[in-house]
Amino acid sequence: MLTGLAVENLSLARGHRTLFEGLSLVLEPGELLSLTGANGAGKTSLLRAAAGFIRPQSGTIRFEGQDADDARAEALHYLGHQDGLKPARTAWEELCFQAEWCGGSRDSARAAAQRLALEPLLDLEIRKLSAGQRRRVALARLISAPRPLWLLDEPMAPLDAERRSVFGTVMAEHLSGGGMILAAVHDPLPLAGRALQIGGPA
C-alpha cells in the first residue's frame, strides 16, 4: 500500500539543458504540495519523472510502502496538460474506458459523472466538447477509480469558477481520506497546502 512519496537530490534535464539539480521533497498522506515556478522551470518534468515517463539525470524517486513499478501501475493517477481522451469516443464511452482501465467500474464512472455534472454531455463525442468540458471528463477518472497519489499538471486551468470550486471540494475530500496530491500550478489552488518553488527561468 502506498504511504508516501520521497524525492531525494533529483536532477532533471530537457535535451542538453539541466532544468534543476538537487531537488528533494516528501509527500505524506493527507498532504497537498503545489509546484510553482516559471514556464520551463521543470514542474511538468518533475511530475512526469514521478509517473515514470522520463528518467532523472541523478537522484531517486521512492514510493513508500510499495515497489515503484507497482505504485505507478496501481496507486497513482497522472493528469497532464493533454487530457488523454479519444476524440471519436463519446464522453460516456471514454469515461467508462478510463474508469475500468484504472480499476473502477461503470457504476463508479456514473457516480463520477454525476459529481462533476457531466450527465448532459455523456452522449457527445469528445471532439465536440469545450476545453473545460474535456478536462472535467479527464478529472472524473480520479473519482471513478480511486488511487492514493494524484499527479496533476495545471488541473484547473480550463475550468470556470464554479467547476474549480467543485473540484476543489473533491481534492479536499481526497486529502481528508489520506490521499496525496502533487500539482504543478501557476494560479493558487482553492485549498490549503504547501508550496515548492522549482528553480530556473524559461
Image (spheres, rainbow, N blue to C red):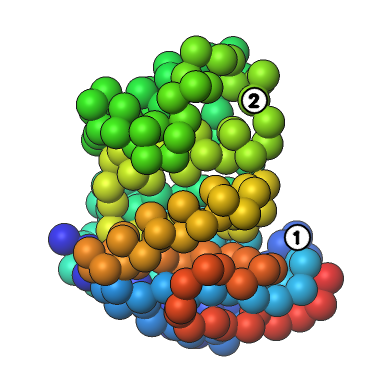
Q: Secondary structure at mark 2?
A: loop
Q: Quadrant of the C terminus?
A: bottom right
* Residue at 31% from the left image edge and 60% from the top image edge: 174
Identified by mark 2, the residue type is: Leu
* Residue nearer the viewer, 194 or 136: 136
Q: Is residue 180 above or below residue 130?
A: below
* Residue 201: quadrant of the picture: bottom right
Q: Which residue is mark 1?
A: 15
Q: Is residue 29 above or below residue 165?
A: below
Q: Which residue is mark 2?
A: 129
Going from N to C along the chain, the mark reached first, 2 or 1, is 1
Position in image of residue 17 (x %, y %):
78, 69
* Residue nearer the viewer, 156 or 180: 156
Disc assigned to residue 180: none
Position in image of residue 30 (x %, y %):
29, 73
The mark lying in front, picked from 2 and 1, is: 2
* Residue at 54% from the left image edge and 48% from the top image edge: 163
CA neighbours of label 1 inside 10 A, class few (<14), some (14 to 19), many (20+):
few
Q: Is residue 177 above or below residue 58?
A: above
Q: CA distance from mark 2 to mark 1?
A: 34 Å
